[in-house]
Amino acid sequence: MTDATSTLPTQLPPARRRAIPPDVAAARVRRRYASERTFKALGIGALALTALFLVMLLTSIIVKSLPAFSEHRAVMSVLVDAAVVDPDGKRNADTLRSADYASLTRAAITTVIPGIEGRSARKALTGLLSSGAADDLRALVIADPSIIGTTIKTPMLFSDDVDLYLKGDTGRYTTAAGVAELTPSDVKGDITLTAADQSFAALIAELEREGISADAEAGAHVLDGRIPSRVVYVNGGAVKVVKATANTLTGPVLLPLSSVSPAKTGSWNLTTYAQPESRRRISDQEIVFIDKIKSAGAIERGFNWRFFTSGDSREPELAGIRGALIGTALTLFVTLILCLPIGVLAAIYLEEFAPKNWLTDIIEVNINNLAAVPSIVFGLLGLAVFLNYFNLPRSAPLVGGLVLALLVLPTIIISARAAIKAVPPSIREAAIGLGASQQQAVFHHVLPLAMPGIMTGTIIGMAHALGETAPLLMIGMVAFIVDVPTNISDAATVLPVQIYLWSDLPEAAFQQRTAAAIVVLLGFLFAMNGAAIWLRNKFERRW
Amino acid sequence: MTVVYFTALALLTLSAYVLASRRSVALSSTGVRLHSLPAYHGLLAISLVIVPMLLIWAVGTPLVSQFAASNALTNFPAETRNDALQAGSALREIKNLAAGQRSGDVSDTLRAAADTYSAWRTTGDYLLLSIGLAAALLGIAASLRLVSGPFRARNHFESVVRVILLACAGVAVLTTIGIVASVLTETIRFFFDPNIKGRPGVFDFLFGTEWNPQQAMRADQGDIKSAYGFVPLLTGTLLITAIAMCVAGPLGLLSAIYLAEYASPRMRRYAKPVLEILAGVPTVVLGFFAALTVAPYIRGWGEALGLDVASESALAAGLVMGMMIIPFISSLSDDVMNAVPQSLRDGAYALGATKSEAIKQVVLPAALPGIVSAFMLAMSRAIGETMIVVMAAGLAANLTLNPLDAVTTITVQIKTILVGDQEFDSAKTLAAFALGFVLFFITLILNIIALRIVRKYREQYD
């Protein structure tokens, strides 16, 4: 103490003394406290903004995904025609499998809206159903051939565009009740609807606002696919408006009218679909058909189990994640059986046995650097070494698992080392003191105590592997694969890659499915991380 | 054959254990005192079976297939054999035919070659199996002979275990060697192999301002103009990284300061999981969010302000990448600030500093090296990130610093070139490996510097 004080200068320099007026001092203190508060608020703000990002991310994805978890089906009576399904009556499995079920589903939907004439209208009607409807019917018949020849009532899947329309994706429409008595010229074909003069002045004015002026040649305002489309519902039928004058509307019949008798004021209506026909994937004709089926009460909405039970497909309504889930499971299985033993043994070596020399140093520096190498570089390694040098199969979970194992190995080694280090030396010393060899002490006493920590690290590493995409793109796991893989050398894809593939597709239905697949992926990740936290809380010991 | 081999391996392993440990038990029941427990005699016997059998399999299988392939190729004329490309495709066809995966017309030469291949394979596989079995039986015999009272089975087994442990630790080193070897050899070929058409010089690559890799699809398209200028990719990558750091730097650091210095334990308990969840969100999910939610928003705002925004702007990708690295920066900086000794803070308080003054003037300067290294690690992560930029940034290699334009990055180009069918010997494919090498190199330098700073700094306060 004396030494310390003796080094101080015996004479302090004269202090700068300047009287600070009390009000200035108070202002200064206030300023300092204000800046203190600002600084603290900045910190809270940064945290809040981060949380807001997370909330925005999760809500936007969950909201996008919700429609994909349900699907619309038409509940219809189908005649399982023996002449189509099983013409020779032998119930031969091959005959049953190769029969033309699509013709049966087409026939079924035409019975719901009878009287449709014209090729394009019939095509529009039968096109409402998904191609999967026929496959479902096939599965029903093969499961129970006794239904052949009978009429069964079964739900049939709609196509993705119809499904989206029913989920309200096509946008708003407005309905205006008729303001005058309306006389149709015919019940089908191209017809003219006539009313008292100036009845449609409001419509004409609306069209003018939308940039349509009177066409001199036609003597009317001509509507095209670039403006909101108009449909007149009259006498139980529907007419699309193509030409409009002050007292007539002309256009093709979309749904046959029941009669040509004049419709009273208020008994008909003019519906405007805000989204122009050219900007949606579903035509006015189809909308009219769907609304008709809906008013017949033949539409049901159910949970989309198919999303979890089928593989990938080009048709959004048929596409599912089962193939990707199985591919993920196989890939992670390979990863786990490789990186858990190697990671733990490497950690044991480095923590317990490694001599302090240059080799150990190199290994340690290596592991730390490897943990920060971009994942796509591991993909390059997989491509060059596993695919091109060892000729392992492309797109296979085997190679994917190998690459991911190398990727997460550093994570597992680092966390396993931390877990082993946390076991107090007294445990080892006690074991060695009782005559155990060093390896016996480690494998019989230290390792079991470190196991919960190792498991936590492993689960977190596997969660990391589960979300990884880029290296798997490099080794060809991006192929379009319909079949569900059955072993580790089959071509397969994994959930994150499936998400990437779907997100690239233009159909709105695929975007929803992408979001739904993300929800499933995040569900797995949260479950794994939750398990890790639970494990840590339950088994963590403070020595 | 592999199945048979490994079934034999499993059976022999089991019998080796049972035989050796039984024998030692029998020995000890006659009154001989054993140095090692019976289990160790069994385990040593196991290692004497597994190690030679695995070695024989690992060395022998590639040899057999190499030998069978070269013998099969003798059915083809010499010019096919000497041309690496033709020989390769012939070999693929032979293997497919031998595996029964080829349908359609097959030429006589090919069928004969496939028969030769199968014949040699079968012979080789049987040979391998018999050598493996012989070695295993020898191993068992040796281990049974070795069982005796004074024999130190445990010590021998433990030295085997030690070698296994070292081998496992060596996997990390092997991985690095594998990465460097695979990426570096292709890069050297890209620059210096005279057989590669359209390869650029090193100088053109490093300083060229045009990136336009093309691949001749047919022989008569040989003179397609390719450009391999690296500069637009580097500026694109750095632009997106800079945007990301502008977002994540302040947000990550400020939240770390709040968590480390101000937050109550309760607050930490709620705030930490938020950051952990954000850190755990896969990048493909963030890419989807960037491409489908953030990019249209930015475009909408840009149009409202009368700006011309590309639909795949650097800004959208950069913002979301910033979100990705916030937790990274904040958790690393949090750790660093927690490591600053409390005495430094107490000193500042004693001199009358407010909390924020103590943080700004004492804690942050003390933690600065650690924070700098956290930023460097975050940058290296942003540079190497792939999925966000693949989904939200563009493919066009524009040389621009305007964040509203579409730019491309190193990782996007690697992915674009290598996904789908490629010819392994074209300049385009090799260019991807050259980019991979540059990426590995840049991130490695950043990591090494950052880790060195951290280590030095940690020693200072320990």
Image: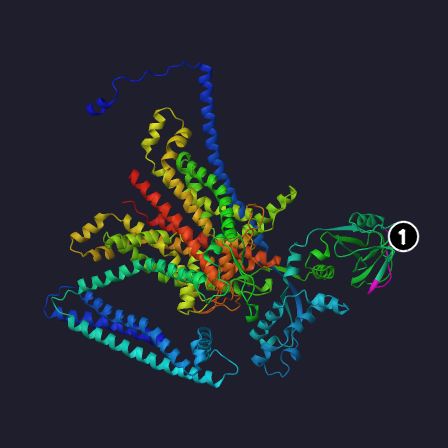
x and y, in percent, of residue B261 in the image: 40, 34
Quadrant location, the N terminus of chain B: bottom left
**Quarter occupied by the C terminus of chain B:** top left
Mark 1 is surrounded, within 10 Å at the Cα level, by few (under 14), some (14 to 19) or many (20 or more) other residues, namely some
Element class at badge 1: loop
Say which quarter of the image contains residue A486. bottom left
Residue A47 to residue A227: above or below: above
Q: Number of marks in the image?
A: 1
Question: From which residue to which does the magenta span run?
Answer: A180-190
Magenta: main secondary structure: loop
Residue A393 is left or right of residue A104, and the answer is left
Magenta segment includes B203: no
What residue lies at 40% left-to-right and 65% top-to-bottom? A385
Residue situated in front as seen by the camera: B398 or A243:
B398
Left or right of B340: which side holds A426? left
Pick whichever, A163 or A40, lies toward us. A40
Asked whether the viewer can see residue A452, the reply is no
Residue B69 picture location, percent across and down:
39, 78
Tell me if I can see residue B301 in this picture.
yes
In the image, A109 versus B38, the foreground residue is B38
Q: Residue at x 55, y 52 (%)?
A: B392
* Percent position of residue B368, x then y: 38, 37
* Spot occupied by residue A448 in the image (x, y as percentages of width and height): 28, 55
* Closer to us: B78 or B69: B78
Asked which colour scheme the image uses, the reply is rainbow
Q: Which residue is mark 1?
A: A196
Dot 1 amino acid type: Ala
